[in-house]
Image: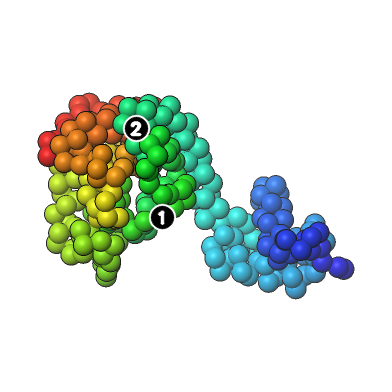
Amino acid sequence: MTERGGRDGSRLSSVQNAARLLKELGSAGGELGVSELSRRLGLGKSTVHRLLATLTAERILEHDAATGTYRLGLVVYELGARVSMHRVLHDAATTVIEELRNATKETVQIAVLDGREVVYVERLESPHTLRLFGRIGHRMPAHSTSTGKVLLAYLPEERLEVLLRQWRLEPLTPQTITGQPQLRAELARVRARGWADNLGESEAGVASVAAPIRNARGEVIAAVSAAGPTMRVNGDSLRGFFRASVVNAGDAISARLGHRPDRRVRGAS
């Protein structure tokens, strides 16, 4: 029995076969063994066994030792939930961040937390000629950004402690927080006032302000920010107009996600 690989040099046959195997398990709606998967996929049993062993080691599949069968693992459902969340977040945020960009004339971003980093999942560029470098999918250390501070500040205490354990806070600029006592104090301030700022901590000459985005259960699942050069975003303008605009945008997106707070208490700086 021959193995089916990619049809052109741009595809990895092993990855393609793994994808086909996952699709087959998904469409089967239950558990399948090596022999049945080999028959359905047209692959040798040894190849199927290696694929199954690798995917099981990565927790993408689960193996039932009693029956010798395999099924999709929890990781697959976790990934699916993330994709679904990002789609819902995109739909809820699109018009709000357009309005925020138009009001502030600065770059607007939405970020989510991935370990000790933030990942920017939405971005609208400033209309100004002088604007920030970045792209969707860009990552930054969470302790150095306004969005990261928001997302860290609202983590459950036990999750935050796990992240902080043995975390070396690398300096990106002379203004970056590099001590854990200082970071803890900063996160307490963010929780108290409901927003975070970044004054040259991730990149010299760049400032930003961020606010939380909550789901229907009140959990902070993302953060929205407006960022620009310190020649335009600084001091009073950052903590006044920009702060109010970004917090209101966070509230608006949260409302679209079903968040209905009994009351909203906004702290001052």
What's the residue at 24%, 53% (across, down)?
Answer: 200
Q: Quadrant of the N terminus?
A: bottom right
What's the residue at 44%, 52% (across, down)?
Answer: 138
Note whether 141 is above or below 51 in the view shown: above
Spot occupied by residue 58 in the image (x, y as percentages of width and height):
54, 65
What's the residue at 43%, 37% (across, down)?
Answer: 124
In this rendered view, identify the residue nearer to me: 51 or 177: 177
Per the image, the residue denoted by label 2 is 105
Secondary element type, mark 1: strand
In contact (CB < 8 Å): disc 1 and disc 2: no
Q: Quadrant of residue 36?
A: bottom right
Cα separation, mark 1 vs mark 2, equals 23 Å
In this rendered view, identify the residue nearer to me: 212 or 81: 212
Q: Quadrant of the C terminus?
A: top left
Secondary element type, mark 2: loop
Q: Quadrant of residue 121?
A: top left
Spot occupied by residue 52 in the image (x, y as percentages of width and height):
65, 66
Per the image, the residue denoted by label 1 is 139
User: Closer to us: mark 1 or mark 2?
Assistant: 2
What's the residue at 62%, 57% (across, down)?
Answer: 71
Q: Is residue 83 left or right of residue 44?
A: left
Q: Which numbered disc, 1 or 2, marks the residue that appears first in the sequence?
A: 2
Note whether 155 is above or below 35 in the view shown: above
